[in-house]
Image: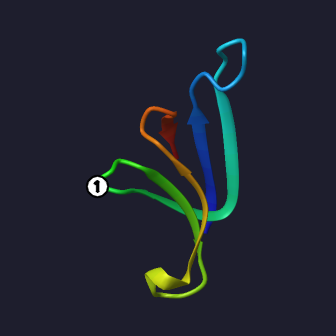
Amino acid sequence: MSTIRVTLRNVDDDGKMMTKRYKHARAHINPTTKVLQVYRSDGPSLDDQEILAEFQPETYVCWE
């Protein structure tokens, strides 16, 4: 697995963008809600996922 880097908008009082990193993680965007989910998977099933973070579409700029 790789490191997921999420760029968030207007997080601090100065309006600067902030970057969060999650090591050994994966990410996907829910096609219905557009929520970005960062997770670790312990197995092949969706039930085996540990959600590390969720971001609403208005809070993140990009992820890679």
Residue at image location 71% in from the left, 22% down from the top: 12
Q: Quadrant of residue 53?
A: bottom right
Q: Quadrant of the N terminus?
A: bottom right
Residue 34 located left or right of residue 58: left
Residue 4 located left or right of residue 21: left
Residue at image location 50% in from the left, 57% down from the top: 37
Q: Is residue 29 above or below residue 11?
A: below
In x, y percent, where is residue 41? 57, 77
Q: Quadrant of residue 40?
A: bottom right
> How many tags in the picture?
1
**Residue count near mark 1 (Cα–Cα under 10 Å), binned few <14, some 14–19, many ≥20:** few
In x, y percent, where is residue 50? 61, 73
In x, y percent, where is residue 3? 65, 56
Residue at image location 51% in from the left, 43% down from the top: 63
In x, y percent, where is residue 28? 43, 58
Q: Is residue 51 above or below residue 10?
A: below
Residue at image location 60% in from the left, 84% down from the top: 42
Q: Which residue is mark 1?
A: 31
Q: What SS does tag 1 mark? A: loop
The amino acid type of the residue labelled 1 equals Pro
Front in this rendered view, residue 30 or 4: 30
